[in-house]
Image (cartoon, coloured by chain):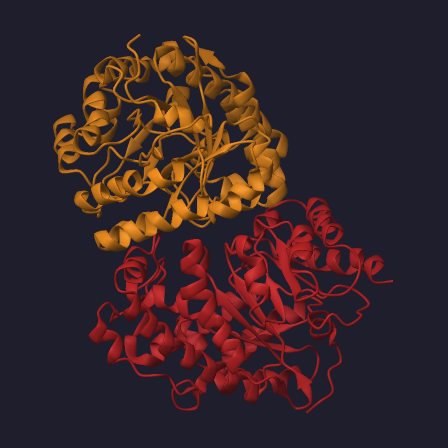
Chain colours: A orange, B red
Amino acid sequence: MTELKNDRFLRALLKQPVDVTPVWMMRQAGRYLPEYRATRARAGDFMGLCTNPQLACEVTLQPLERYPLDAAILFSDILTIPDAMGLGLYFETGEGPKFRKTVRTAQDVESLPVVNAENELSYVLDAVSTIRTELNGRVPLIGFSGSPWTLMTYMVEGGSSKDFRRAKAMVYDQPEVASLLLEKLTLSVIDYLNAQIRAGAQAVQIFDSWGGALAHDAYLEFSLKPMQRIIDGLIKEHQGRQVPVILFTKGGGQWLEAMADSGATALGLDWTTHIGQARERVGKRVALQGNMDPSALYAGKEKIRDEVGKILAAYGSGSGHVFNLGHGITPEVNPEHAGAFINAVHDLSASYHQ
Amino acid sequence: MTELKNDRFLRALLKQPVDVTPVWMMRQAGRYLPEYRATRARAGDFMGLCTNPQLACEVTLQPLERYPLDAAILFSDILTIPDAMGLGLYFETGEGPKFRKTVRTAQDVESLPVVNAENELSYVLDAVSTIRTELNGRVPLIGFSGSPWTLMTYMVEGGSSKDFRRAKAMVYDQPEVASLLLEKLTLSVIDYLNAQIRAGAQAVQIFDSWGGALAHDAYLEFSLKPMQRIIDGLIKEHQGRQVPVILFTKGGGQWLEAMADSGATALGLDWTTHIGQARERVGKRVALQGNMDPSALYAGKEKIRDEVGKILAAYGSGSGHVFNLGHGITPEVNPEHAGAFINAVHDLSASYHQ
């Protein structure tokens, strides 16, 4: 494999010295970029983009052409696993993802297969290897999966939800059914992420978008525990390099101590958490990723720079910080403001790494 | 005024000894009750119910007829203030609240009046005094208001929002406009809550439904600071009795220490916070209210009882706890399960007050 030309991102995750704080943006290949919208229009629809490795590679690389980002992230959807389980993922214009089949009873769960990624998600693995080749060692490539709990919410609800009524009712009223569903998802995610690592992903992130909707005890049991099992089951090292795992529970700021004991290399923070307090709470156990409010990108460039400076100061000196937004960049952001954000991280962080 | 027959709720807020832990439910007069749905049908629509003091009184008292609740809460909407400012609140079937006018520019904000509750919200004050008379000392009556930040989100967005894009853009890009809007809302809320207290409310709750959407620093500046100013401006004692103030920021679990310094008597907790850890964090400064996941009411009665028991045990011995859900009760809940919840609190809590 080609030598990495920029390994700041991997070094920061492992708390090794870096020259400046590395930065990438969740959803950096997204609708705020006109070049993304053009490729997506060519693909026809969102799933057409995800299932075409050449086009997925194209959009993955677009933000790297514009900005000095320190990592690329596989372009895909978090719902590929339930789709591969046979639920029939589709997207309606202006609405979120939907499934043709839902999973609500013990029988529904029993009949679900565990996913074999090499067989059923080869289009994702092809995208990973294509991107890795095209990157040619420029920056590391991040693979990812949704967390079991997050995937479960979509499968039980049949799509997006405001209150996760049915999924949470299953947790309280049929905990053994919820646990079996989570078990099948856990095994599927392990297989999926390991296949991504073998195909070329140099770090992986678990997106637990909806863990924050759970009560304290339910989070530990139904979201964190399956994620811990995934981390245990992942390939630790590939081609002589450690494969870091980033755990991101949106709304999980109250549970950082427990998350830091999960075996993850780093925790993703959403924008509600004070990153300096988070660093104190997790100690040396994990690196931190985050966490500017994506809404701050609606402000002027000077204000964006101020916000970046506040987060750098709150984290303080030394390695172990990967800068990011606290959630995905939104479609309405001016791409120049995203550029100001990225430049500010590199400009302002050097003094924290002397 | 009539002597209070059951003052457990007020005593617990002030950390005075109680025989059992008092309990009420946010949105206890709500769609899960068939008698509520019947009255609402008679009223025509939701605002018809809010603006008719007799009907508002009727639905306020309905849950007290069914359950041994320890407090009544005024039936009203959090958006009465922006409506009184002239924005034209309306509800479309199956959707959230909407405003005919939005507030997005400096000029929009400058032209907004501060609300005088006696003049413009007399229907709410009439409801308060009617309910207080009808209660006849049975339990205390809670008045309430939305927080300035929460009201601002609806006013800027023109209704409900998933990401508060426009309101948060105002915070980052036009902070002085946001501050002026919050200032006018703060003065209006002070006037409104004091008028409710004079009309008979024996405690008040500030509902900060969307404070949890803000970044750490932005929460302190744009949500908590206005609420502190409100607390400073409230009548402390009325007719010889202290008027407790409950501050409830949904999603505010990371900020409890700062909230405890606000001058509030008690903090409301949503279901994501471990109440035992919260008690340690806030110390003796405030009482706590909460915090069972409303979704637990979808489970069977035994499971509901277990969940109540876990929260009581987590809080531990002594006064200072008002039991509640971590958010409003949902329309799909079986009223018998709500009853099981309330009974479990009284049954299981006695041993913590010996």
- Relative to the observer, which residue lies in front, B57 or B270? B270
Residue at the right extreme of this rendering: B354
Task: Tell me if residue A197 can be seen.
Answer: yes
The image quadrant of residue B14 is bottom right
Q: Residue A215: horizontal and vertical position, in percent?
A: 58, 45
Task: Tell me if residue A113 can be seen.
Answer: no
Image: B100 above or below A153? below
Image: B159 above or below A208? below
Q: Is residue A233 left or right of residue A318?
A: right
- Relative to the observer, which residue lies in front, B49 or B270? B270
Residue at the front extreme of this rendering: A354
Q: Residue B322: horizontal and vertical position, in percent?
A: 68, 64
- Relative to the observer, which residue lies in front, B170 or B295? B170
Q: Is residue B342 left or right of residue A141?
A: right
Identify the residue shown where x is 28% and y is 58%.
Answer: B169
The image quadrant of residue B343 is bottom right
The image quadrant of residue B112 is bottom left
Image: B267 above or below A292? below
- Report how many numbered discs are placed on residues in the image: 0
Image quarter where the N terminus of chain B lies is bottom right
Q: Residue B140: horizontal and vertical position, in percent?
A: 66, 78
Q: Is residue B233 left or right of residue B48?
A: right
Q: Residue A244: horizontal and vertical position, in percent?
A: 45, 22
Image quarter where the C terminus of chain B lies is bottom right
